[in-house]
Image: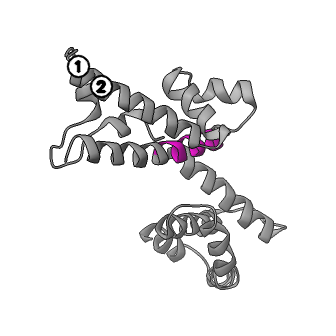
């Protein structure tokens, strides 16, 4: 926000008035547009601020202001998705902060006693059942990226689906799998 204030101090009164009028006229519509496409209100507010900052710093004349603002907002939304780290399988395996047992302690241990083998079997059965509950496109991207270790770029090239869409699908898959496996974990490991 300080950058916008600095920028405003370098503007003429006419430029300040135009900027103020544009913000008043478009902020509600732009905010609604952005809010529908991001996860949190804070992200929407940040993107809206970025759009108006970019508008204030833009030195060339803009013929179609509405189109320019919404295109800039759409680009900022896309940029925000690219910056986010995709959900990983490790997120499913990790334990809670209070030092509970983790799936990785069971799945990747050298211990092959009957109890550990039984827990592994239950884990993989539950994981496969949870994968089958997913919509096909979420299951596919999860299996390709996590289990087959194929990068998003390669999946995108093969399927012609944007990387941001693939990341989003995988995120929903991980959230579902995490929920299903946490139920199992609570039943088996932390009784």
Q: Is residue 181 above or below residue 116?
A: below
Q: Which residue is mark 1?
A: 114
Residue range (magenta): 164-174
**Residue at the (58%, 46%) spot, across then down:** 168
Q: Which mark is residue 145?
A: none
Cβ atoms under marks 2 and 1 closer than 8 Å: yes
Instruction: Residue 171: say if magenta.
Output: yes
Q: Main secondary structure of the magenta part?
A: helix
In this rendering, does residue 50 appear at all? yes
Q: Nearer the viewer, residue 150 or 6?
A: 150
Q: Is residue 173 left or right of residue 136?
A: left
Q: Is residue 10 left or right of residue 23?
A: left
What secondary structure is marked by label 2? Answer: helix
Q: Nearer the viewer, residue 120 or 16?
A: 120
Q: Position of residue 169 (x, y in %)?
A: 60, 43
Q: Which residue is mark 2?
A: 118
Q: Nearer the viewer, residue 140 or 20?
A: 140
Q: Is residue 155 above or below residue 88?
A: above
Q: Is residue 99 left or right of residue 24?
A: left
Q: Position of residue 86 (x, y in %)?
A: 48, 40
Q: Is residue 82 above or below residue 110?
A: below
Q: CA distance from mark 2 to mark 1?
A: 6 Å
In this rendering, does residue 107 appear at all? no
């Amino acid at each position: 926000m300080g950058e916008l204030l600095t920028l405003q101090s370098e503007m003429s009164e006419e430029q300040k008035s135009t900027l103020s009028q544009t913000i008043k006229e478009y902020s509600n519509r732009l905010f609604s547009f952005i809010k529908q496409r991001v996860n949190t209100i804070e992200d929407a507010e940040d993107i809206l601020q970025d759009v108006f900052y970019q508008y204030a710093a833009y030195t060339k004349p803009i013929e179609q202001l509405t189109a320019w603002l919404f295109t800039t907002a759409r680009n900022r939304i896309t940029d925000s998705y690219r910056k986010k780290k995709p959900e990983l399988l490790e997120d499913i395996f990790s334990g809670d902060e209070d030092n509970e047992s983790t799936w990785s302690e069971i799945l990747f241990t050298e211990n092959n006693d009957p109890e550990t083998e039984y827990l592994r079997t239950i884990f993989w059965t539950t994981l496969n059942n949870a994968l089958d509950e997913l919509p096909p496109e979420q299951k596919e991207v999860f299996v390709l990226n996590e289990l087959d270790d194929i990068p998003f770029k390669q999946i995108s090239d093969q399927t012609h689906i944007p990387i941001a869409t693939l990341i989003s699908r995988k995120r929903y898959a991980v959230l579902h799998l995490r929920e299903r496996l946490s139920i199992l974990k609570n039943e088996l490991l932390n009784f």
